[in-house]
Amino acid sequence: MRKFLFFLLLIIFLAGCSKEKTGIVTIDNQNIREGEILSFKATKDSICYDNGKPAVRVFSTTWCPHCKWVKGTFNKVAREYVEAGKITAHHWILDTGDDELTTEIKESIIPPDEMGVYKKYNPDGSIPTFVFGCKYVRIGNGYEAQNNLKAEEAEFRAVIDKILSEEK
């Protein structure tokens, strides 16, 4: 019986010491499961499309420090997926009316249907507000307290990939 317990404990110990942790990514000392969605809330809505592709949006302002913190990371990820032809994306600046992702065009007013999306998913009007495919929503940043833009990027990618895997 003692030998059995010894071998059982040895197996448990060795399994716990294994270097292979499938699906776990360590980002700035935080273990995050690859593809895990932690800070976005799932809605019961169908995926919303813009020009036949899932629509990804963020609503922010020029004066919001939280918006400024995440701006570059969101824009980078959104542009990558847009250039790959997988999504449409908008980064609406509420106080100027501009879509920051359309650098060739300087908008001065946010279209009413886009404002409708913002108001539907964030009736209190907080910023930043992320609406990914109308399936996942987040108000505020998920990892700003840890100053972890890598985790923000990983979760943006996880949410977009999840939407793409669910579409049509």
Image (cartoon, rainbow, N blue to C red):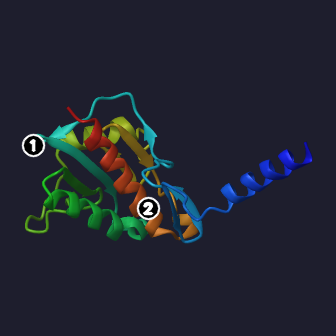
Q: Is residue 137 above or below residue 33?
A: above
Query: Foreground residue, 106 or 144?
Result: 144
Q: Report which quarter residue 55 is drawn in.
A: top left
* Left or right of 111 in this view: 27: right
Report which quarter residue 94 is drawn in.
Answer: bottom left
Q: Is residue 24 visible?
A: yes
Q: Residue 123 — which label?
A: none
Residue 51: mark in rendering: 1
Q: Residue at x 78, y 48 (%)?
A: 8
- Relative image position of residue 62 (x, y in whole percent): 33, 67
Residue at 57 percent across and 67 percent down: it is 146
Please give the name of the residue rendered at 72% of the width and 53% of the height, measured from the top-left corner: 11
Q: Is residue 76 left or right of residue 1?
A: left
The amino acid on which the numbered mark 2 sits, given as a three-letter code, is Glu
Q: Name the secondary structure under disc 2.
A: helix
Q: What percent of the width, then of the height, locates residue 15? A: 66, 55
Gap between marks 2 and 1, in whole Å?
26 Å
Q: Residues within 10 Å of mark 2 (few under 14, many from 20)?
A: some
In the picture of the structure, the residue carrying the numbered disc 2 is 152
